[in-house]
Image (cartoon, helix red, strand yellow):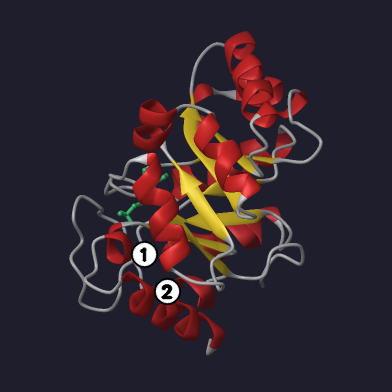
Amino acid sequence: MTNENFPAEIIVALDCLTGEESLRLAEDLGPGLSWVKVGLELFTREGPSIVRTLKAEGYHVFLDLKFHDIPATVSGAVRAAGETGADLVNVHAAGGEAMLRSACDARPPHARVIAVTVLTSERAGGEVVVERALLARECGLDGVVCAAAEAAAVKRACGAGFLCVTPGIRPAGGARDDQARVATPAEAAAGGADLLVVGRAITRAPDPRAVFERMQEEIREV
Ligand code: C5P
């Protein structure tokens, strides 16, 4: 069920870190690290240069800024996100059809644009997630961010090639923190998730590389 263009992979969320710390962490995770995520915290602190630096280091970058504004503003923001070299950019599906269509029209040639359905920190996902995923597909977007447990339903509704990016990933028995809809890496990969976003379970671990490698192993065994 994995998207043919993206084998199931881990994206490490470089949250709660400075630019320097995030580059060090990425390096410490070793050669198996291909994808990193720059979110609101890191982007607000460091600006677009952190995306350019990570790209120059050879990483694929998911720029997770969840644009949600009027259509003209969102299309400008998506275009600007593309100028940083980011490979994956997102908007919030709650922005509605016109906003999603403008995001799609502004899609940079080298990047994919996906839509956040319902935040994984919110309890209720369910039908709204599939409805928003269908809307995003209709508007021409490349996929969605959803909880791992919703990936299978999204793939059934939108097709195997529709990208499912799933945050809320925790090792079995790991702390949920502020996330409500969580899954282990194996559960997410088995459900059809293409890219698994993992932040604190790796970034706050005493040995981040060991956790990262264990999670990669877990995915490979599915
Ligand atoms: O630390 P943790 O693994 O919970 O981090 C999850 C990351 O994924 C955070 O950077 C958060 O902003 C992001 N995210 C999310 N839920 C979404 C979209 C993005 O948790 N729906």
Q: Which residue is mark 2?
A: 185
Question: On screen, 161 above or below 2?
Answer: above
The residue sitting at 38% across, 74% down in the picture is: 209
* 215, 113: nearer the viewer: 215
- Residue in front for this viewpoint, 205 or 170: 205
Could you tell me the amino acid type at mark 1? Answer: Ile
Residue under the point 41% across and 67% down:
28
How many marks do you count on the picture?
2
Q: Quadrant of the N terminus?
A: bottom right
Question: Which percent across, then down, holds residue 154?
Answer: 58, 56
Q: Secondary structure at mark 1?
A: loop
Write the residue at 76% across / 67% down.
4
Q: Are marks 1 and 2 in contact (CB under 8 Å)?
A: yes
Circle 1 is placed at which residue position?
169
Can residue 197 be spotted in the picture? Answer: no
Where on the picture, by quarter, is residue 115?
top right
Q: Is residue 134 left or right of residue 199?
A: right
Place of residue 124 in the rendered image (x, y in percent of width and height, measured from the top left): 31, 47
**Quadrant in the picture for residue 160:** bottom right
Foreground residue, 148 or 65? 65
- The local crowd at label 1, few if under 14, some if 14 to 19, many if 20 or more residues have their Cα within 10 Å, is many
Residue 18: x %, y % from top left: 33, 41
Q: Residue furthest bottom?
A: 221
Task: Give amino acid for label 2.
Answer: Pro
